[in-house]
Image (cartoon, helix red, strand yellow):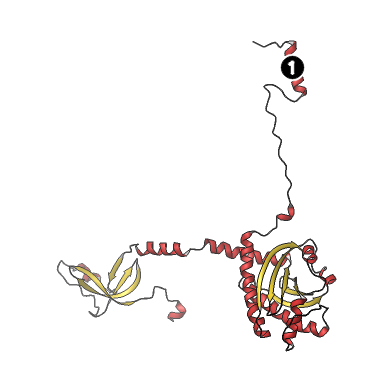
């Protein structure tokens, strides 16, 4: 039987409809919460990638310590300070007004990277190359053409060691390109490009300074892809503990062992004439060993012997388990 609403119930239902609240009606959809998404953080390198990059460039720092220390014949140390992903404009904003800048070429990826060295460390290095004591310079100034050639030889050592450090991961030719002024460095990469900024501290007996290496996105992405591939391979590899467990299980596995005489030709007549107690001559010398098969593979030559009430095989020599190629056999 249908329910007839009173006028009061109709008025109440109308008011509820006006407010968006219908008694007994379908549930209103919940309002979704919308939060802001920072697209700049999507391409940020993660902690695992930072660790891999740090390990790779700590090797570069050690190589530079040894090579430049021998070249300058003085106590020389290079240490990795930081690994960051910054826009190129952020990198340029951190550069001092008076510094040494140069570009380096990376082939075959067709990329240019930026090297920056504090003049506070560049002048003592040049002093050592010229036979001086490598003392600190109180007043910094721009380099002369001769000084640029001297510091270029140091940059070439750095590029060579960077190429050596990258070689196990990424094969790339890295060479010195040219000296840059601060305003020229701005055209090396786009200001918004996500670059990889590596910072190193150089320490000498009396001075210390910073060496910065800024890699373009194409170079850093190629390097990260190779590092990620190597990390994934090592994670899926067999650990030492797992390898020991697997070896223990294999050592307890059982394989069928069979001692056979070399094959011999027997006529059908001899076979049909065989009776119980007859001796079948196999025309094999008594001193010729038998073949011991393990899991249907020829593994050893052995002599049949008695081990108490059991039979056994006295091992003579091991046979090769690898098939001989036709070329080698001929």
Secondary structure under the numbered disc 1 in the rendered image: helix
Q: Residue at x 74, y 51 (%)?
A: 38
**Quadrant (top left/top right/bottom left/bottom right) for the C terminus:** bottom left
Residue denoted by label 1? 12
**Total marks in image:** 1
Q: Is residue 140 above or below residue 277?
A: below
Quadrant occupied by the N terminus: top right
Percent position (x, y) of residue 299? 34, 72
Above or below, 191 relative to 270: above
Judge whether 197 appears above or below 157 on screen.
above
- Work out which residue is located at the far bottom of the displayed protein and give it: 131
Give left or right: position of 189 versus 55: right
Q: Nearer the viewer, residue 18 or 209?
A: 209
Point out residue 153 in the picture as x, y percentages from the top left corner. Answer: 73, 83
**Within 10 Å of the Cα at label 1, are there few (<14), some (14-19), or many (20+) other Cα atoms?**
some
Relative depth, front residue between 233 and 68: 68
| Residue 165 x %, y % | 63, 74
Residue appearing at x 79%, y 77% in the figure:
178
């Amino acid at each position: 039987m249908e329910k007839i609403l009173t006028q009061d119930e109709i008025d109440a239902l109308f008011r509820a409809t006006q407010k968006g609240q219908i008694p007994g009606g379908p549930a209103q959809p919940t309002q979704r919460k919308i939060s802001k998404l920072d697209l700049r953080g999507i391409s940020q390198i993660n902690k695992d990638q930072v660790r891999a990059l740090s390990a790779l460039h700590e090797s570069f720092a050690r190589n530079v310590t040894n090579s430049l220390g021998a070249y300058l014949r003085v106590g020389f140390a290079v240490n990795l300070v930081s690994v960051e992903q910054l826009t190129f404009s952020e990198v340029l904003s951190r550069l001092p007004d008076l510094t040494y800048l140069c570009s380096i070429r990376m082939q075959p990826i067709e990329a240019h990277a930026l090297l920056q060295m504090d003049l506070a460390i560049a002048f003592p290095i040049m002093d050592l190359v010229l036979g001086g004591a490598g003392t600190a310079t109180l007043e910094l100034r721009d380099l002369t053409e001769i000084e640029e050639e001297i510091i270029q030889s140091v940059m070439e050592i750095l590029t060579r060691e960077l190429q050596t450090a990258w070689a196990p991961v990424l094969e790339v030719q890295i060479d010195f390109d040219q000296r840059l002024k601060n305003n020229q460095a701005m055209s090396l990469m786009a200001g918004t490009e996500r670059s990889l900024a590596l910072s190193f501290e150089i320490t000498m007996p009396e001075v210390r300074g910073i060496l910065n290496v800024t890699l373009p996105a194409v170079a850093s992405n190629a390097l990260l892809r190779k590092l990620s591939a190597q990390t994934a391979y090592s994670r899926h590899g067999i650990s030492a503990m797992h390898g020991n467990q697997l070896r223990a299980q294999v050592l307890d596995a059982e394989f069928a062992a069979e001692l056979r005489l070399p094959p011999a030709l027997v006529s059908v007549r001899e076979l049909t004439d065989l009776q119980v107690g007859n001796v079948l001559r196999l025309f094999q010398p008594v001193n010729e060993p038998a073949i011991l098969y393990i899991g249907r593979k020829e593994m050893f030559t052995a002599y049949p012997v008695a081990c108490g009430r059991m039979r056994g095989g006295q091992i003579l020599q091991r046979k090769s388990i690898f098939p001989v190629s036709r070329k080698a056999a001929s």
